[in-house]
Amino acid sequence: MRTYRFLHNPAMRTYRLRAVAACALAIISTAALAACGSGDSGGGGGGGQSIQIWEGYTGVEAKTFAKLVAEYDKAHQGVTVSSLFVNNDYTLQKVQTAVAGGTPPDIAYLYGSWAPNVARIPSVVTLTNVVKQPSVDWNDFWVGERDVATVNGRVIGIPALVDNLAVVYNKDLFAKAHLAPPGPDWTWSQFVADAQKLTDPSIKQFGTAYVTPGTEDTVWHWEALLWEAGGGILNSSDTRAAFDSPAGLASLDTLRTMAVTDHSMYLDPTDSAYANLFNSGKIGMLVTGPWDLSAFPNVHYGVQVMPSYPGTDGGHQTISGPDNWVIFNNGSSRVATAEKFLLWLTAPAQVKYFSLHTGDLPTRASVANAAGFDAAMNKSLPGVSTFIDNLGNVHQARPQLASYPQISQAIGTMVVSVLLGKASPAAALATAAAKVNQILAGAGSN
Amino acid sequence: MAATTLSAGASRARSGTRRLRRAESLTGWAFVTPATVIIGTFGAAPIIWSLVISFQNNNGLSSVARFVGLRNYEAIRHDPVVTQAIGHTLVYTALFVPGTMLTGLFLAIAMNRKLRFMWLYRTAAYATMAISTISEALVFIWLFDPSYGIVNYFFSLLGLPQQQFLNSPSEALYVIVVMTIWGWSGFAVVIYLAALQGIPPDLTEAAAIDGCGRWAIFRRITLPLLSPASLFLAVWLTINALQLFDEVYLSTQGGPLGATTVLVYYLYQQAFVNFNFGYASAIAYLLFVVILIVTAIQFRVGRRFTYYRS
């Protein structure tokens, strides 16, 4: 009964009309939104001269990158390169959504560990022939980078960033413990002995640290050890696990001695605490990458290559986690514009400019080997030159398989179970190898 | 004559009513359409779409997805990690829900009185809801750090053995329980405080005059009158507990050794780390069924203990 009066009140009638109008508006705007999402991917309008790039640079990297882009825009009339900030950790998720909606970016910065899965996206542009051009000088990129940009012989990206692991040590703690600082020929048994001498439970000081969430960060630290001990992750045809070997045992024994026997290793379940502790002078040595150096302003640190296992053919190795620029197909003219821009961005002059301004390692060997480059880099970020030289110790890459994330989880569980003293190295290796073989067998049928 | 006029009048009245009804329903639609469109686009469509995906072998990358029938659901039955994750989720829920409700009830009763600076205490209690999960996780990581944490420091003062907390597969889940109880207690406090203030003082006064002790008043009057709030909290907190993700992602990433891998974290891992979207969607539907069953049980059991004063 109430509604009856409601509708016959003239004021309410206008209200009703307004509501209908609002409803129509809502439908129209939703439709318009949907159209924005799927239809118009031209952006630049016909000329193919406007491209969008997704990157996750912050701070000084963002500033330097913006400068390079502006420079390119200025030199290339009619071409507009617009960049959009996306948190690197989530770029692939966002790219997946954009691909499903039909509007991928023209270029995206994607982690190298995703490469085998990125290669499965249909709109990813194959760059195999592009990088063969002599002007690109593909072999000038480090081998670790080229390996990660290539999936089953197909080049899907151009290296955007390169790094590697080396040992960062606290010079003052070494001096206090009357230890000689590590030299370039040092061994893992020396590392273990130093770690023990640097440990002092009374002041909560540890010789070294290891991250234990069991994620890829746990895994790649161990993979470098495995290679140095002369082992391999998988067999040469990537069909079976190869790490259940004497080398696997030696590498896990090294970790076990420090974590379980000597208690000289701080186990960090969070993947973030270790850096603060090193900067507070609570940790003697860290196996880490150049990105952490700027987090250590309070300590007097040195950098040395990773130790070796004498008696094996591993020598001093390291592992590299390169990232890629990947091009997505938004029509041939935009692909051409994107390729041209990327080749300019990754040419030696721009690589050198970017490294000198950000402290990031150079993605090209010719830049690293140029006279005076090391010294210039070290001035802005002390110790980084060792990481640059260490790029020469990158001989292997992680398996380029779509199932690598699962393999990584099995290895992560193995390493953590040894570090926490829950399994012996031999038993952990056997369990993980069986699991990896199962994953590799299953991947074939998928 | 009279009859025709009557019937003509009746039909006029009828058509008038019809017009009225149509106008009425149009107005109704006008009001609900914007919400329907938004909920339909961002709520219902993904729900249906993920059901479709759960029957596919879908990696979320390539454009082709093969229909595999119930194979994803069968795989769940043979996946030991799913069984473990369900176990962790249920243990977590069984501790978190009563823990949060008791903490909230205790604090609400303590603050349901006239005291100086009460606004300050109430704000402090509710602040746990306003603090972002990231800050919360970071603070708890340091509190429970095995070597440098203040919790182990207090343990050593009390002569208790040092614990590994987040580094121990048998303790990590309980640290997350404590962390989330702290985070959610503010919410429970607000609900309970509102409910406590809705209890008419004449009831408790009458009971006191009749010779009831404080415990008896609490047990016989306060608690039954709080039961609607308790049921609401139990359902709400349970649904949230079954969907636990943020704290795990931020503090342990499911470890150590899978000890804190709860169902939603495993789902995330399958979808966004392993690119098994089909399998992840099937797990999501399993979770949906679990939540549906648990909530139905809560309503059924809860109704028996809930007292509505109307």
Image (cartoon, coloured by chain):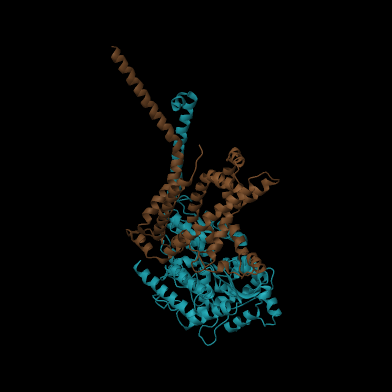
Please name the color used to draw chain B: brown
Q: Give the residue drawn at x 55%, y 74%.
A: A365
Q: Position of residue A355 (x, y in %)?
A: 60, 67
From this viewpoint, which residue is outermost toward the top? B1
Residue toward you, B15 or B188: B188
Please name the color used to draw chain A: cyan
For the N terminus of chain A, which image quadrant? top left
Residue toward you, B231 or A205: B231
Is residue B265 shown left or right of residue A357? left
Residue toward you, A209 or A440: A209
From this viewpoint, which residue is outermost toward the front? B211
Q: Give the residue drawn at x 47%, y 83%.
A: A246
- Asked if residue A79 shows in the view, the reply is no
User: A235 above or below B56?
Assistant: below
Q: Position of residue A271 (x, y in %)?
A: 57, 67
User: B79 above or below A82?
Assistant: below
For the C terminus of chain A, which image quadrant? bottom left
Q: Position of residue B157 (x, y in %)?
A: 67, 68
